[in-house]
Image (tube, rainbow, N blue to C red):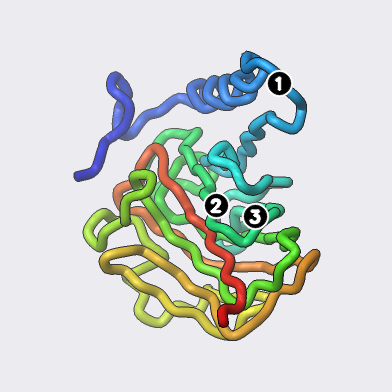
């Protein structure tokens, strides 16, 4: 079942103020904690109609830009310090309107480019992305959130370091890049389209680098 949004807010109108307030709150929370240091701060990056946060830990966002169109994708730059899964938190900061103008509305069509620095000390031989509407729960086929599941022959999924990919839509929404390698202290680029035809206020992108086994 889809959660339409916070109580008291319209499903199609969401002023930009709550997004700014959320950013300010997340930035302020670490300041209230005992033993606060600058390294503990959570940074929230705004781009287009969304914000992007590394608040769940394990990695650092170093930049965000773009509106989410094919010609101007949402570009997120990150640094991963281990080879364990990490989760990117994505929130809407503009009104939700399916198929509205990118950048002005959270329209459910998000062309993405993610540049990841491998600072894990280990080579990666695969890299998987998974979408979740509810944290730690699979995003099922019928919820509208996917890696462009309506397109059976996508031409917008690519990587600088991996030659092939697989997509799974049931019981998970997963995108696996394979047949490649990312050495330590090298950056890999991923490009893909995320779609949510019933846009949600908050959702998650799990990123899972894979190391050689055996």
In-image side of 130 versus 7 (left or right): right
Q: Earlier in the sequence, mark 2 or mark 3?
A: 3
Residue 136 in the image: x percent, y percent? Answer: 37, 48
SS for tag 3? strand
Q: CA distance from mark 3 to mark 1?
A: 30 Å
* Residue at numbered disc 2: 86
| Residue under pointer 3 | 75
* Front disc: 3 or 1: 1
- Residue 124, image quadrant: bottom right
In which image quadrant can residue 143 be found? bottom left
- The Cα–Cα distance between marks 2 and 3, rounded to whole angstroms, is 18 Å
Q: Quadrant of residue 21?
A: top right
Please name the residue that numbered disc 1 is placed on. 36
User: Which residue, as the protein is rendered here, is positioned at the far right?
Assistant: 185
Label at residue 155: none
Q: Residue furthest left?
A: 1
Q: Secondary structure at mark 2?
A: strand
């Amino acid at each position: 079942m889809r959660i339409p949004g916070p109580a008291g807010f319209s499903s199609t109108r969401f002023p930009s103020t709550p997004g700014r307030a959320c950013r300010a709150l997340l930035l302020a929370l670490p300041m209230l904690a005992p033993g606060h240091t600058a390294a503990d701060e959570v940074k929230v990056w705004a781009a287009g109609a969304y914000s992007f946060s590394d608040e769940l830990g394990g990695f650092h966002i170093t930049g965000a830009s773009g509106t989410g169109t094919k010609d101007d994708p949402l570009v997120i730059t990150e640094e991963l310090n281990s080879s364990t899964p990490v989760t990117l938190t994505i929130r809407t900061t503009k009104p939700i309107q399916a198929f509205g103008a990118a950048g002005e509305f959270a329209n459910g069509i998000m062309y993405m480019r993610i540049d990841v620095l491998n600072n894990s000390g280990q080579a990666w031989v695969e890299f998987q992305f998974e979408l979740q509407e509810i944290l730690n729960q699979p995003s099922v086929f019928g919820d509208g959130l996917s890696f462009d599941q309506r397109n059976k022959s996508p031409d917008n999924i690519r990587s600088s370091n991996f030659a092939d990919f697989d997509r799974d839509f049931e019981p998970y929404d997963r995108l696996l890049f394979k047949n490649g390698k990312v050495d330590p202290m090298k950056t890999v680029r991923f490009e893909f389209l995320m779609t949510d035809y019933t846009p949600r206020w908050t959702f998650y992108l799990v990123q899972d680098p894979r190391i050689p086994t055996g």
